[in-house]
Image (cartoon, grey):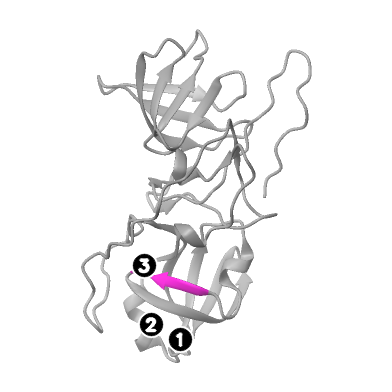
Amino acid sequence: MRQGAGPKTAGRARRQRLQRDSRRQTTDGSGAAQARQDQGPGTQNLTNLPTGATGPADSRLPPPISAGAVRRTPEREPRPGYVAVGRVLGPFGLKGELKVQALTDNPRRFAAKSRLWAGDQPVTVAASRGAGGHLYVRLKGFADRTSVEKFRHALLQVPEDALPSLPEGQYYRFQLLGLTVAARDGSVLGTLDEVIETGANDVYRVRTPAGTDILLPALDDVIVRVDLAAKRMVVDPPPWR
């Protein structure tokens, strides 16, 4: 977990900490779709904001992929009520191993016996290893390259309710996306559409009703309050926004 900054010092606002688990996908510089997310105490990036509460997960299923079918394009969004923790790039070798791009800072998500969803299918991790910036994962019951070909481009997911509880005032990234963003006077600025990771503090991209963007730094003196139950974030925008 990327640790948040220490106590406030004069003239400097404390950075917000943001969890990487998320249902929203973005596109990196190479054009590959990626989910932003995280998963477990001690290994997550968290947003440390005023307190709020989560709602129940939605377990609706997407249309199933027929047995033996191969996904031709990357799966871009997790199932409703689920969070992506990895993306299958494709089979590796001949013994059923999958090359996976991790979308979480928590390596325990891919430990042996871990339960995941690969697209719309529940799977259990048999073993995993890291090499060259990627993970190589074997799934129980899949012993050859042909049997795992159907998982190519699939997102590896976990239910939202399987995520560990966070301390008061800290939120998973997916909990913030879609919140209505309003100023202190109640005027609505727009909808929180993306969380941008920078070298310093994270930045929230807010889409206005007119279709333009407002960029807000995720700092204590800008983010006044988060109410997940009301799906609302109150902010004090800097004058240069």
Chief secondary structure of the magenta portion: strand
Instruction: Please report the bounds of the magenta region as a residue range.
Output: 115-119
* Residue 147 lies in quadrant: bottom left
Out of 148 and 24, give the one closest to the viewer: 24
* Residue 131 lies in quadrant: bottom right
Residue at which label 3 appears: 154
Residues under labels 3 and 2: Cα distance?
A: 11 Å
User: Which amino acid, by three-letter code, is at mark 1?
Assistant: Gly
Answer whether labels 3 and 2 touch (C-beta < 8 Å). Answer: no
| Mark earlier in primary sequence (2, 1) | 1
Residue appearing at x 57%, y 67% in the figure: 109
Residue at which label 2 appears: 148
Give the x, y percent position of residue 236.
51, 15
Is residue 123 highlighted in magenta?
A: no
User: Which amino acid, by three-letter code, is at mark 3?
Assistant: Ala
Is residue 118 highlighted in magenta?
A: yes
Give the x, y percent position of residue 166.
61, 48
Residues under labels 3 and 1: Cα distance?
A: 15 Å
Residue at which label 1 appears: 96
Give the x, y percent position of residue 84.
44, 59
Residues under labels 2 and 1: Cα distance?
A: 6 Å
Residue 62 shown left or right of residue 79 in the figure: left
Answer whether labels 3 and 1 touch (C-beta < 8 Å). Answer: no
Query: What SS does tag 2 mark?
Result: helix
User: Which numbered dot is residue 2?
Assistant: none
Answer whether labels 2 and 1 touch (C-beta < 8 Å). Answer: yes
Q: Residues within 10 Å of mark 1 (few under 14, many from 20)?
A: many
